[in-house]
Amino acid sequence: MNKSTELILEYAKELAKQNVAGSGDCISVKSGAEMFASDKDVRLEDLTENDVLKIKLSDAEGEYALHARIYAAKKDVSAVCHCHPAWVAPIARCGATIPAVTDDMTQIVGRNCKTCKNTAKAIVRNLKKRNSTLVSSDGCVTTGRTLNEAYTCVLVLDKAAHCFVASAALKKNVLINFFEAILMNVIYKMKYSKKNQENLQSEEGNS
Amino acid sequence: MWDKNKENELRQLVKDSGVRLLEENLVQGTWGNISARLDEDHMLVTPTGLDYNHLTPEDMPIVQISDPSVWSDGKKPTSERKIHAAVLASRPEINACIHSHPVFATIMASCRMPLPAFSDELKEVMGGDVAVGAYGLPGTKKLKEGTVAAIRGRNACFMANHGVFCVGRTMDEAFNVLRVLEKNVYEYIRRMTLEKTGKTEYTDDLLFDLFVKSKS
């Protein structure tokens, strides 16, 4: 089994274990002019080696074309997770934006996470300045320099969605200041996560 | 000065505790940090920004409690070492600290709501209500001072829009504080949701209905 297939299987199991997987999920990693992607018709918890597809970026269609367009638009991205976590999905359904509710969200995701139309063009546009987006009537698409980073984005985004919903329902949202949120995001990308991502890139074989 | 065997045991303990945080879903990614006291002026802490699964016991740096800018061995220590040092300096009975971002406790932290000591378990394990420390950017003096003030006389506090800080006489005790806090926050949210909706059985949909009402 090649390294990319191993990675897809490992993180598919992790996403399922963390209860952030749903039907229609698809995760991929870029490998040169190709990508390895999970079969979108197979639930992540049921994924086997035979369900990991090797697809030429230039020939990708449907769900896989979305991943290919993201890789083409964002050169620093090596992994994409298209998932439907329990707390993210209802927010995406009502077209809301998750604001800066937690420090870890502002660091890894950005100062907010907006919902866009469910089209490849809109998703790619929303990902221009962020590494994650909510997708209307669907779920979320997260990206990363490594699959580990895209996976962590899904976890942190779902937790932020849960915090956003619960704190508004029980008391009120207290948001992080705009400039502090931007600052944390920059520090995370340029400094805090740098060494770990370099280690992971070399381990995942996409350095 | 401490015994080298004790140091090696604590190095392994800190490493294992980091992995435990991930395995129990009490933190995501590289966030959160852990410390264990070596002697009255030294502690072992987790390094900054590295995946717990990939750390070795030797990666844990030794940090001086009276001046946390001084460290040796291991990799660059967590930027939150000043909070760990301040808590260990002011609480000689405490030997282990855990800072993490568990889901339910982070909800309280994100709406900056203290947790009343509504159960005997909370009174016994936390020592009373759980307060929220003032917001500060990670690694700042403001965050340190807010956390130290909020945890005074207690075994845990919330860190505004961030996570929690828990302490114990041992690492197991600190983990127990963290787990009890998470469990009781869930119970508190469940009770508040039922009270607000007038229902008798909790589901996540109830919380979402309240959210939709709050936004309309």
Image (spheres, helix red, strand yellow):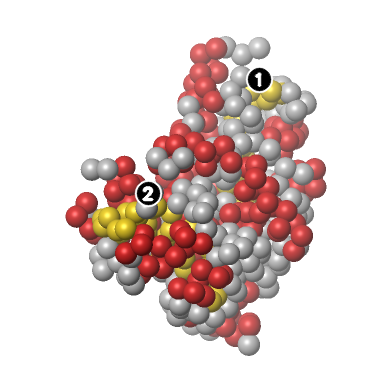
Q: Residue at 58% across / 64% down in the picture?
A: A128
Instruction: Classify the position of the C terminus of chain B by image quarter.
Output: bottom right
x and y, in percent, of residue B176 in the image = 51, 44
Viewer-nearest residue: B69 or B123 = B69
Q: In this view, does B44 lie above or below B204?
A: above
Between B91 and B139, the one lying in front of the other is B139
Residue A1 location, quadrant: top left
Taking the spot 43% from the left edge, 76% from the top edge, the residue there is A138
Looking at this view, is B136 or B96 the one in front? B136
Q: Residue at left 55%, top 75%?
A: A115
User: For this view, does B209 lie left or right of residue B62?
Assistant: left
**In the rendered view, does A162 fall on the left or right side of A37?**
right
Q: Give percent across and percent down for residue A73.
A: 51, 62
Residue A46 in sight: yes
Say left or right for B144 vs B108: right
Amino acid type at mark 2: Ser
Q: Which amino acid does label 1 sit on?
A: Ser
Q: In which quarter of the image is residue A38?
A: bottom left
From the image, state whether disc 2 or disc 1 is nearer to you. Answer: 2
Identify the residue under disc 2: A31
Secondary structure under tag 1 reads strand
User: x and y percent of residue B62 in the render?
Assistant: 64, 23
Give the residue furthest to the left: A50
Would residue B206 be seen by someone viewing this image from the given angle?
Answer: no
Q: Is residue A126 above or below residue B205?
A: above
Chain holding disc 1: B
> Horizontal and vertical percent for residue B6?
53, 17
- Subunit that carries the residue with mark 2: A
Disc 1 packing (10 Å; few <14; some 14–19; many ≥20): few
Q: Name the residue under label 1.
A: B72
